[in-house]
Image (tube, helix red, strand yellow):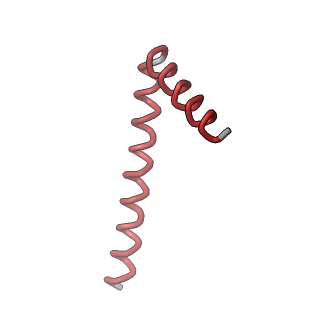
Amino acid sequence: MKKLLTYAAIAFVAFYLFTQPAGAAAAVRGVFDSIGTGAERLSAFFTSLFSG
């Protein structure tokens, strides 16, 4: 069952990439922007923690 769900998820992602490439690019960009924002905030936290 787990293998079937994995294949279904991969098929859905592939279908989405081929039918909505602009939307998929925006989603990936959003994920990376969120990761970057989180890293910047974490860096600012530790900088203020150790500099004060």
Between residues 49 and 8, which one lies in front from this camera angle? 8
Looking at the picture, does residue 23 appear above or below residue 41?
A: above
* Rendering coords of residue 48 (x, y %): 37, 77
What residue is at 41 percent from the left and 62 percent from the top?
41
- In the rendered structure, the answer to whether residue 27 lies left or right of residue 40 reads right
What residue is at 45 percent from the left and 22 percent from the top?
17
* Rendering coords of residue 36 (x, y %): 37, 52
What residue is at 44 percent from the left and 48 percent from the top?
34
Q: Which of the image's four quarters has the N terminus?
A: top right
- Counting labels gives 0
Residue farthest along the right direction in this orientation: 1
Looking at the picture, does residue 4 appear above or below residue 18?
A: below
- In the rendered structure, the answer to whether residue 51 lies left or right of residue 42 reads left
Picture quadrant where residue 18 is located: top left
- In the rendered structure, the answer to whether residue 6 lies left or right of residue 24 reads right
Looking at the picture, does residue 2 appear above or below residue 9?
A: below
What residue is at 41 percent from the left and 66 percent from the top?
42
* Rendering coords of residue 27 (x, y %): 47, 33
Residue farthest along the top direction in this orientation: 19
Between residues 15 and 42, which one lies in front from this camera angle? 15
